[in-house]
Image: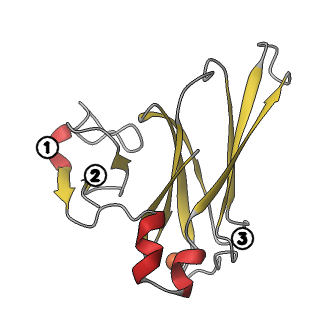
Amino acid sequence: MKALVCSVCGYVHLQDTAPEKCPVCGAPSKVFNLKEDGLKTKTDIVTAGESEKKHLPFITVETKNCCGQQPCHEIRAKIGEITHPMTPEHSILRIVFYADKNFIGYTSLTPSLNPVGAICVTNIENKKISVVALCNIHGSWLSEL
Ligand SMILES: [Fe+2]
């Protein structure tokens, strides 16, 4: 599906207009381009094969009390029903988290890690959680809770 993508770092913006600056790399709004295939979703699985099963984020949210702010919520995303490879040639680079389509944070990965990311936040009750996984070869993949 169409999405606004930062041409510097590959961050995908889930809203209709580009942000003032990229929340990941800080580049100005002018570097955002509306890309025809900027984001792939579960519906793309119908027309695709095994590779997609390795890219969709599986999201869980667990309410905790770990940060001294009650309550806090750990949003966790594992990438792929079949676990995505993590090699220098092919890996998940970043997992980005959104609440009501607003950026809330991200995890950067290196090939020595497993394709899992998590953040801990407050004030996400009743908000729609979205996660985008960025693969260096296969682009960005969206799941929503
Ligand atoms: Fe991939």
Residue at x 55%, y 70% (from the top left corner): 55
Secondary structure type for disc 2: strand
Quarter holding the C terminus?
Answer: top right
Amino acid type at image mark 2 = Cys
Badge 2 crowding class, 10 Å Cα cut-off, few under 14, some 14 to 19, many 20 or more, is many
Identify the residue under disc 2. 6
Dot 2 or dot 1, earlier in sequence: 2
Left or right: residue 14 compared with residue 136: left
Q: Quadrant of residue 86?
A: bottom right
Secondary structure type for disc 3: loop
Quarter holding the N terminus?
Answer: bottom left
Of 30 and 118, nearer the camera is 118
Residue 137 visible in rendering: no
Amino acid type at image mark 1 = Lys
Residue 133 visible in rendering: yes
User: Given contact means CB atoms under 8 Å apart, are the residues at marks 3 and 1 in contact?
Assistant: no
Secondary structure type for disc 1: helix
- The disc placed on residue 48 is none
Q: Is residue 54 above or below residue 118?
A: below
Dot 3 or dot 2, earlier in sequence: 2
- The disc placed on residue 112 is 3
Q: Quadrant of residue 78?
A: bottom right
**Ligand 1 neighbours mark 3 (CB distance < 8 Å):** no
| Image position, residue 129 (x, y; %) | 55, 38
Q: Is residue 71 above or below residue 138?
A: above
Identify the residue under disc 1. 30
Measured in 3D between alpha carbons, the distance from the residue under mark 3 to the one under mark 1, in whole angstroms, is 34 Å
Left or right: residue 116 compared with residue 25: right
